[in-house]
Image (cartoon, rainbow, N blue to C red):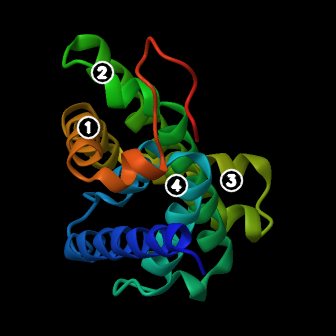
Amino acid sequence: MDHHNSRKIAFSGIYIALLLGIGYALAYVPNIELVTALIFCAGVLMGYKQGLIVGLIGEFLFSALNPMGSGLLFPPMLLAQLLAMAFVAFSGALLRRFILNASPGLRASLITGGSGFLVTFLFDVLVSAAYPVSAGFPLRETGITIFAGLAFSIIHLISNTLVFMTLVPLICQQVYRAIPFFADYFPVMSITGNNDAD
């Protein structure tokens, strides 16, 4: 294995460990989590391919080993979580050039906060739909179940929107500048420059 791939694996492993540590630290706090934001940041910092790999592995381990109940006990929910987090990582990669170059302000806050709301909403919808869809519920009952689940997700939606508005751009920019690995292996041009190298 060459040095390039070794460093990618090492930094990806460190990032996944950080994701799991922070995720489990908040596991007993209802509807408050940073896993979604960290997987989004993985997409921002590492681009589509590596961000997706880190996001899927991180979410799988977080769900499978969760002290509140393993996702392995209910595969449809685990699949829903993985699909949602794949979209989260993809969204981060899609917005990486904007986020890494964004100046603080209303426009940046609205875009990152809106992104946080949308990816969190998608996650909650997919997870709420996992049981009724897998159990063969009719469409109407499935919709009712999803709506009822979302009623309990208001705090989750609000907290993630605030995290994305205030912390995600700052953390991504500071980490990208402070750790040369990300700029060396997953470079992103300035907004006025060419397309991403990743």
The three-letter amino acid code for the residue at tag 1 is Gln
Q: Which residue is mark 2?
A: 102
Quarter of the N terminus within the rendering: bottom right
Note whether residue 108 is visible. Answer: yes
Q: Position of residue 151 (x, y in %)?
A: 40, 46
Instruction: Please tell me the numbered disc located at residue 173.
Output: 1
User: Which quadrant: the C terminus?
Assistant: top right
Q: Residue at x 23, y 36 (%)?
A: 162
* For marks 4 and 3 on the same chain, the one whose residue lies earlier in the sequence: 4
Label 3 sits on residue:
142
Q: Which residue is more in the foreground, 130 or 8? A: 8
Q: Secondary structure at mark 4?
A: helix
For the residues marked 4 and 1, what is the alpha-carbon distance in whole angstroms? 16 Å
Mark number, residue 51: 4
Picture quadrant where residue 17 is located: bottom left
- Residue 57, above or below 116: below
Q: Amino acid at mark 4?
A: Gly
The nearer-to-camera label among 2 and 3 is 2
In depth, the one of 16 and 192 nearer the eye is 192
